[in-house]
Image: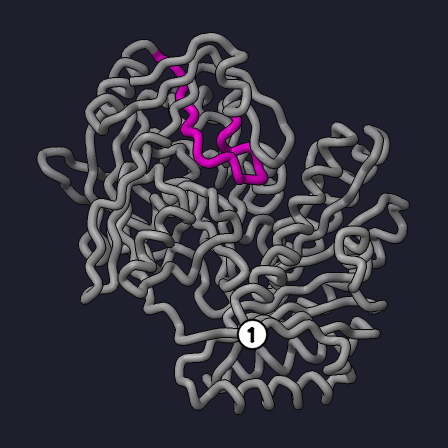
Amino acid sequence: MIVKRKKPQFLSYLEDTSNIKGKAKILFIPESQKELVNLLKKASAEDMPITFSGGGTGTTGGRVPQEGAVVSLERLNRVISINPDKKEVTAQAGITLKDLEESLSKFNLTLRVSPTEPLAFLGGVVATSASGPRSFKYSSIRNYVKAIKVVLSSGEILVIERGKIFANKRNFDFQIKKKRFKFNLPSYTSPQIKSSAGYFVKDDMDLIDLFIGHEGTLGCILEATISVQNLPLDYFDCLVFFDSDKDALDFIDEIKKIKECNSFYPCAIEFFDRNSLDFVREDYSLLPSANCAVYLEQEIELPEQQDRILDYWCSLIERHNSSIDKCWFAEDYKNREKLHQFRHWLPQKINEFLRQYRQEKVATDIAVPDEKSRDMYYFYEEKARQSGVDYVIFGHIGQNHLHFNFLPKTHEESFRAKGYMLEFIEKALSFGGTVSAEHGIGKIKKPHLEIMYGKKHLEEMARLKEVFDKSCILGLDNIFSKKLLLKHR
């Protein structure tokens, strides 16, 4: 066990990309499962709060402690097994997605649902039900988790396999080894769109889905078994520039119709508004003048498909009033990497901007149903202009999941921006949307989740947490306030 007691030794563990700052008395880095189990037993006996630290790529402060101890799983980072026949990998929670991909590539396999950040830990990805650019085709990690090993604050280890334990309506009653669990689920129902807002709940649900997206509040994920896919034969990327928002949105709507017809369609569709393009223009001086852009990633499974697919996209692009001459096509590894870097540079630059001005992130992770996507986009535009604060809009428009980011330079601008955020949330919820589509709730979005579900349902979540974390020491102030736990103890 590596132990660091002096704050300067673990300052980097007290923040994530949200720019909120935390505090803790000590950092533990267990080097074995046994060390972690013993640590949690000791923490429970001493009533010491524990915050699990992932790779630091989160945006909601989930790994940022407010008290007690930080526990990092960075040394529990092995690939345990890869089964090419079953297309499954089992790995420890501390492995990064980058290292996992490198191991899988030796077997011509990949985790196509990989979230945006290659340095994210597998355990953190599962614990937040993360997704990424390819979620238009592959959805979130939830659909690929086959089994998890979880250690509770008591030190008990649960191995949960998909398809083995189900609720009866909203009631769970099961036994793992000699331990019996009997409890009722909260009475809300999770949105039927891309969402990672609070505990996943529905009638007759699989137990494993309760732990996917629990944000370190129920236990600690030690290992996960994940379904993986064959590497595609090839793929190409394309950045399509439009002179009008309407043309871009019409283009996206047609792609959605293609998906509904079960024809070939891209695995990723990303949107960048004019402000996003201008924000990175100094780093990409060859960007053409445009009102917005749409990024596509298209897989190619067979050699004979390549020319036909390229011709199809060229035709579709021109039909929606864009110019092939202005598009950026990437058909080889070097150019694809350049486009990937462009896609990832924008959120990185936003984070750098906020650090420069010492401002917290003020951004949405909202998703809405298909029929309300365009209305939500125009509402963002209208309110952003009223605010007088700089902003960018970009993200996973294929799932109606745009990231709206204010860019405040002062505390006054930040305060003003947060007021508009509440308007965005209320509008999205009136559309049947969610306050968090992929980043979880963490500590930043607790007020947003209360608006979405109401205090009664947050109290139900708190009671559910106590079923697995009887000591109430894990992930405090993630998802809901610590005060709700104290109320029930």
Left or right for 227, reference 350: left
Specify the segment rendered in magenta: 47-64
Residue 481 placed where, x, y %?
A: 52, 28
Quadrant position of residue 250: bottom right
Q: State whether residue 436 is above or below residue 458.
A: below
Q: Is residue 51 magenta?
A: yes
| Residue 271 appears in the rendering | yes
Residue 249 placed where, x, y %?
A: 72, 74
Q: Please name the residue shown 20% across and 50% down the image.
A: 81
Question: Which image quadrant: the N terminus?
Answer: top left
Q: Count the labels in the image.
A: 1
Q: Give, as a three-letter code, the residue at label 1.
A: Glu
Characterize the local packing of mark 1: few (<14), some (14-19) or many (20 or more) Cα atoms within 10 angstroms: few
Left or right for 72, reference 285: left
Q: Which residue is mark 1?
A: 331
Q: Please name the residue shown 40% across and 80% down the image.
A: 301
Toward the viewer: 1 or 374? 1
Residue 305 placed where, x, y %?
A: 46, 88
Residue 323 placed where, x, y %?
A: 77, 82
Q: Is residue 353 magenta?
A: no
Q: Please name the residue shown 43% across and 21% down the image.
A: 70
Q: How is the image coloured?
A: one colour
| Residue 446 appears in the rendering | no
Toward the viewer: 196 or 331? 331
Toward the viewer: 344 or 244? 344
Q: Please name the residue shown 73% across and 68% down the image.
A: 293
Q: Label the magenta part by its dominant secondary structure.
A: loop
Q: State whether residue 345 is above or below residue 74.
A: below
